[in-house]
Image (cartoon, rainbow, N blue to C red):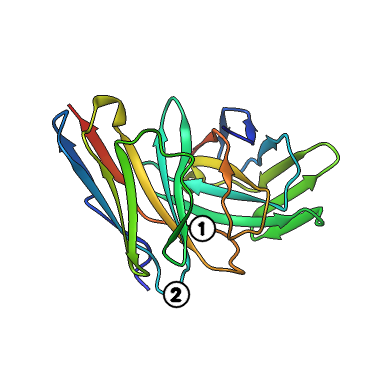
Amino acid sequence: SQQGEEDPQALSIQEGENATMNCSYKTSINNLQWYRQNSGRGLVHLILIRSNEREKHSGRLRVTLDTSKKSSSLLITASRAADTASYFCATAPGPSYDKVIFGPGTSLSVIP
Amino acid sequence: DAGVIQSPRHEVTEMGQEVTLRCKPISGHDYLFWYRQTMMRGLELLIYFNNNVPIDDSGMPEDRFSAKMPNASFSTLKIQPSEPRDSAVYFCASTIVGGKGYTFGSGTRLTVV
C-alpha cells in the first residue's frame, strides 16, 4: 500500500522557473525522504527530513515538512533541463535504514 | 565504490520459465531491499534483509517469488514459474544503520512473454 501521495502527478515548466511538488501521507512518520529517478535509471536519494525538522536545504533543493498536516513539499529553484525526472517522496515509520514506502511520484519536465 | 550492482539489466523470458535476478549491495551496507516498479502499481517493496536475514517478506506477491541472501555481498530474487504479469523493473537497494537513504541499483527490466 502507498503511504505518500505526490501532487501534482505531472508538472511542466520553463527552464529557470521554480518547481514545487507536494507529498501527503496518512500515518505518523520518523522521517520523510525525497528521491529522483531519471528515465530508465534507478532512484537517487536527494534529501531526508526528520519528523522534528521543519525545513532543510541542499543546493537548489528546499524541503519542508508539516507533521500537523501530514505533508511535505519539495522546491527546486532555478530549474534546469537536467532536472527533468520523476520525483518520489518516501515515508519512513521507523529509522531511515528501515523500510520506507514510496508514493506514485511527480513527473517533472523542464523545457529549455 | 561501484554502487549497487544488479544483473542482468534486461531479461526477456517465456512464460513458465525460471528467472533469477541478482544484486550486489554496497560493501558494508547491512540492509538490502528488493522493489518492483510498474506503471500501474508504482514502487512496491517485495522483501528486505538485515544482516542477511529476511525481515519482512509481506510484499512478496506469491509463492512463485523467493529471495535469498547467502552472504553480505549477494542476493537473488527468483521467480518460478514466471508469468506475463511479472513484467516490471526490479530494483535492489541497500543502506546502512545511521544512513540517510537508500542507494539503488540500475534495475533489471524483466519482460515475460
Vertical side of B81 occupied by A77: above or below: below
Name the outermost residue toward the right. A68
Q: Residue at x 78, y 38 (%)?
A: A70
Q: Is residue A52 placed above or below A68 in the rendered structure?
A: below
- In this picture, residue B38 sits left or right of residue A46: left
Q: Is residue A1 above or below residue A74?
A: above
Query: Closer to the N terminus: mark 1 or mark 2?
Result: 2
Q: Is residue B58 left or right of residue B76?
A: right
Which residue has dot 2 on it?
Answer: B28
- The kind of secondary structure element at disc 1 is loop
Residue contact between numbered discs 1 and 2, judged by CB atoms under 8 Å: no
Occupied quadrant, residue A18:
top right
Q: Image point 53% across, 68% down: which residue?
A: B96
| Residue nearest the viewer, comparing A76 with A53 | A53
The residue that disc 1 covers is: B102
Query: Label 1 is found on which chain of the structure?
Result: B
How would you rate the neighbour count of disc 2 (Cα within 10 Å): few for under 14, some for 14-19, many for 20 or more? few
Q: Amino acid at mark 2?
A: Gly
Indicate left or right for A91 with B88 as reference.
right
**Residue B107 in view (yes/no):** no
Front in this rendered view, residue B75 or A44: B75
- Residue B91, position as x, y percentages in the image: 38, 48
Amino acid type indicated by mark 1: Tyr
Q: Position of residue B109 (x, y in %)?
A: 28, 41
Numbered disc 2: secondary structure:
loop
Closer to the camera in the image, B39 or A11: B39
Quarter of the rendering occupied by the N terminus of chain A: top right
Residue A81 coordinates in the image, percent (x, y): 48, 44
Question: Vertically, is A108 above or below A52?
Answer: above
